[in-house]
Amino acid sequence: MKRTFLGEFEEVVLLTVAVLGDEAYGVTITQEIEQRTGRSVGFSTVHTTLQRLAEKGYLSSEMGGATAERGGRRKRFFSVTAAGRRALQEVKQVREELWSALPPQTLQLMGG
Amino acid sequence: MLPKRRTAPRLADRLLNWFCAPHLREEVLGDLHERYALRVERLGERKARQKYWREVLAYVRPRFIKRQPSTYSYPTNTDMLRNYLKIAWRNLVSQKGYSFINITGLAVGMAVAMLIGLWIYHEYSYDKFLPNYQQLYQVKRNYNSNGDTLTFSSTSLKLADALRNEIPEIDYVAESDYIGSSHGLKVGDKKFYVNGGQIGRDFLKMFQYPLLQGEASMALNDPYSIVLTESTAKALFGNEVPMGKVVRFDNQNDLKVTGILKDLPKNSSFQFEFLVPFSYFEATASNVRMARSGSFGDNSFQIFVKLKPGVTYAQVAPKIALIEHTETNNVNAMNSVVILQPLQNWHLYSTYQNGKEAGGFIDYVRMFTIIGILVVLIACINFINLTTARSTKRAKEVGIRKAVGSQRQQLVGQFLTESFLLTFVAFLFSLLVVQLSLPAFNALINGEVSIPYARGEFWLALLSCLLITALLAGSVPAFYLSSFQPVKVLKGIMQVGKAASWPRKALVVTQFSCSIALILSAVVVFQQIRYAKNRPTGYDVNRLMMTNMNSELGANFTILKDELLRNGIAESVSQSSSPATDIWWHSDVEKWPGKNAGETIEMGTIVIAKDYFKTVGMTLAQGRVFTSENDTTSVIFNEAAMKRMRLAHPIGQLIEWQGKQLRIVGVMKDALVQSPFTRADPGMFLCRPVSLNVLLYRISPRLSTQEALTQMTALFNKYNPSYPYSYQFADVTYAAKFNLETLVGKLAGIFACLAIFISCLGLFGLASFMAERRTKEIGVRKVLGASVLNVWGLLSKEFVYLVGIAFIIASTLAYYLLSNWLQRYEYRTEMSWWIFALTGLGSLTVTLLTVSYQSIKAALLNPVKSLKSE
C-alpha cells in the first residue's frame, strides 16, 4: 500500500482548508493559520503548498468571487477532495495510535 | 488634500506581472491586494507597503515563474529552432568524420584569427594606457640633405627652450639625454647597470606613469633626486622603504629617491628602470650646460612635448616648423624643419620617408590582419564545400520539408542554425587552443598577450566574429540546399551535374591559392634572412665582446688591457666611440677635394683607439692605420665614403672636418656596422687620446666562453669595482638586427602551415566524399579490368589539377607581392625559380598524400561488395 505522505505544514494547510469549508482561498487560509497557530506565514509559502497539495490530488479548486479590494480579480477557492480527506484520516489515525501506545507514566510526565 | 493612497505599490505589481506565470497572475495578485487592503486598515499604509514588497519578492520561485506547458504545440519560432538544433546535432553525430573535419578546420582557423587579433590589439594598445596620450609628442627634425629629407630624432637644447618659451600652445617640454641609456646604480654593495634616462622635470606630469610613491609634480625637481621603478627599488633596497634613501649614481653622486613608479608594462614604448632629473645632467656635465646656450646645430638630445588640451598638432605645426631658421649662419639649422610625432604612432610608425611617417611595424600588423582573414576564409570554404558536396544526402530531407509546408526562408534558417551550432562548437575549441598556445605565442613574439576575459569589448568582438564566420560558412550551403525543387528531389531524378561542382572547384582553387601564397611568402622571407645573414660583414663578430665604458674603466683602461692580454684572456683590446654593431655619431665633412657647392654628407663617425681595426677585424684597402693615439691629424675613411666623395686617389689628400685640416692616411674595406640589409654607410675613423664610449675586446679562442667570462668577471671587478660587470656579445647584437624579419618569417611559416593543414583537411573530406559517391562506378570499372593504379589516378587527377591551377595563381600573386616587399631592402635575395618549383612540388605531394588515402581505399574495395545491392 502506498503510504500517504504529508509534511507538517501541508497537513496544517489541508486541515485549514477543511475547516474553512466554502470560504477557503489564499487570504483566508493564511489568516486562519496565523490566528490558530500564532505563527507568521508567508503568502507564497501557503500558495506553493496549496499547489503542491492540488498536484497530489488532495485539493481541488475553482475560480470565482471577485471583489473590489481584489481589483476585480477572482479568487481560487480550494476544497478538500476525497483523497485529501482519506489522507487526513490516515494521519490522524497514525497520531492516535501513537498517542495510545504511549506508556501511562510518560503520559503523566507530559501533563496529560 | 490628496486622496488617501489605497492601491498597492505599482512597481511591485509590474514586477510580479513580469515574472509570474500568466495562469497564476490573477489569483496571486488578487490575494495580495486583498491582504494589502486588510493590512492598511490594521497596520497603516507604510507598513503594509513594506510587507507587500516582501511578499511579492517571496514569489520569486521556480514554481511561480515556470510557464504552464501548453497541451498542444503551437508552432512558434523556438519550436522550429529546437527542431533545427536537434536535426543539426543528429547530423553532427551521425557524420562524425565530416563533423570532425569541419570543426577542426574552423577551430584552427578561428584560433589563428583570434591569436592574430589579440596580437594586433596588443600592438595597438602601445602607450594608450597613459592619460592624455593624444596630447603627447616627440620632437623630430626633417633635415634636408642635398634634396633628400632625412628625419632625425636628435635635437638641441636650444630648441627645447625655444619651444618652451615661444609656443604658448605647448603645455610642457621635457628634454632628455636618451631614454634607455644605461647607467650604474649602487646601494651599499648592490650594484646594477640598468636602462634609464635623464629627463626634464615636467616629464612625469606629461607621461603620467602611475607613481606608487612620491608626486609627479615634485619628484624630478631637485637635481640630486632619482625616481625608481618598483622592481629596481626592490632590487636595490630589498624590503626597506626606498623613499628618501640614497642611490649612488654612476659612482659620482648620491641621489635621493623621490618617487617609486609602478613597473612599466610591456606595451610602453619607453622602457626605463629609473629617471634622473635633467638638471642633474646639467649640474654635473659642463658640456650640457654649454649646449643650453649653444646653437640649434648641437643635436644630441631628445625632446618630448605635451600640447595644451584641445590643441591639435595641425594648429602648432606652422608655428614650430621653421623655428630653427632664426639661426641664419648655421647650415644645419637652416636645413632643419621641426616636426612632431604623436605618441600613439611611436610604436607602429617608426620609419620616415621624405619627412613623413612611412610605416614601420604597422606594415606587418596589416599583413597579419590579412593572413588572419585568409585563414578563416579557408576554414569557411571547407565548411561550404563539404556541405554542398553532401547536398544530395540531404536533398530528400529538403524535399520532404518543402512538401510538408516549409518555406524557403525557414529552410535557410535551418541550415544557418546548423552552421551556427558548428561554428559555436568550433569556437569553444578554438578558445581552448588559444588559451593553451598563448605561452608559446608570447615567447615567440616576446609580448604579453592575454585573453581579456573580463572585457565586454572582447566578447562583443568575438560574438561578431562568430556571427560573421557562421554566416560566411553557412549562407552558401543554406541558399543552395534550400533551392532544391521538391518534386525533382523526391522523384529521385535530381542530377547534381557538372555545373554544381564548378563553384566548389573555384573555392578549392581559392583555398589553395591562399595557402600556397602564404607558404611562398614564408619561404622567401627566410631566404632573405639567410641571404643577409650570409653576407660578408667586413669584420668579425665572433668572440668579439663589448662593454660600455665609464670613468673608472676609462682610468684603468691601460692596465685592464694589459692584464687581459697578459693572461691570454683576450687576443686584442681596444675602445671606440660606438659599439662594433652600431654608429652613434654622424657628422658632416666640410671640405674635400672636388666637393660641389652646398653638398653635404652624413658621415658615420667613429673615434677609435689603438688596435681598433685589429680587434674588430676590419681590413685595410690602401694606405696605413693610425700610428698611435696621438695621430690626431690623420683620418681614415671606408671605401663607401671614398666612392661618395669621388676620390680616386685619396691617400695624402686633405679634408676639413669641424674646422680642422685632416690628412687621409688610409682607406678601410666596407664593414656592415648598421643594417645588414642596406649598403655600407660612408664612414670615417678618427683617433683621440681620450677615454671613449665602448670597450671592445676579442676573447682568445683557446678559452671557452665560460672560462673567459669567469676570469674577466674577476678582472673587471678588480679594476671597475663601482659597476657590475656587464657585456654584450657582438654576434648576438648583430643577430638581433634580424629579429623583426625572423619573427615575421616564423609567424608567416606557422600560419602558412596551419592554412595548408586546414586546406588539406577540406580536401580529405572532399576526396572521401567523391570516393564514396563513385563507389559503384569504381566497382564497374574494376570488373571491366581497371587496375588500382587506374582508379587511383582517376580519383586523384581532379584534385591535382585544381591544386595545379591554384599554384599558378598563387605564384603570380606571391611573386608580385614579394618583389614589392623585397624592394624595401637594398640588399635583397633573388626569387629564384627553384623556390617556386619546390613549393609547387611540395604542395602537389601533400595533395596527393591527402587524396591518395581515400582513392586507394576506394580502389582496393572489392567490387562484389560495392556492386551488391539488396
Image (spheres, coloured by chain):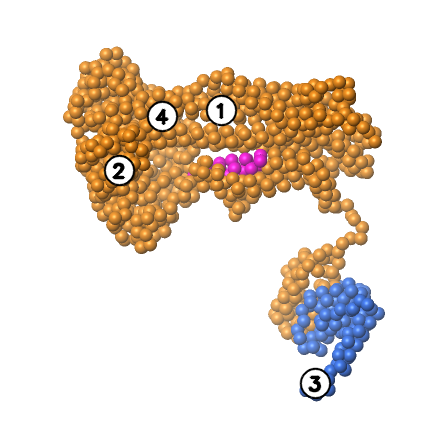
Confirm whether residue B863 shows in the render: yes
- The residue drawn where x is 80% and y is 65% is A57
Figure quadrant of the C terminus of chain B:
top right
Query: Which type of secondary structure does the marked residue at label 4 adopt?
Result: loop
Pinpoint residue B401: horizontal percent, then vertical percent. Answer: 79, 37
Q: SS for tag 1?
A: helix
Is B202 located above or below residue B645 in the figure? below
Q: Residue B535: within the magenta?
A: no
- Disc 4 target residue: B675
Say the numbered circle drawn on residue B523: 1
Relative image position of residue B591 (x, y in whole percent): 22, 18
Q: Chain of mark 3?
A: A
Which chain shows up in orange? B
Q: Chain of mark 2?
A: B
The reply to whether dot 1 and dot 4 touch (C-beta < 8 Å) is: no
- Which residue occupies the foreground of this view, B378 or B262? B378
Residues behind callouts 3 and 4 on a single chain: no
Asked if residue B112 is among those painted magenta in the image, a careful observer would answer yes
Amino acid at the residue labelled 1: Val
- Left or right: B168 as drawn, with respect to B847: left
Q: CA distance from mark 3 to mark 1?
A: 98 Å
Nearer to me, B136 or B769 = B769
Q: Where residue B784 is drawn, which disc sits there?
A: none
Using the numbered discs, state the Cα–Cα distance from disc 4 to disc 2 in whole angstroms: 33 Å
Disc 3 target residue: A106
Give neighbour class at mark 3: few <14, some 14-19, many 20+ (Cα, 10 Å).
few
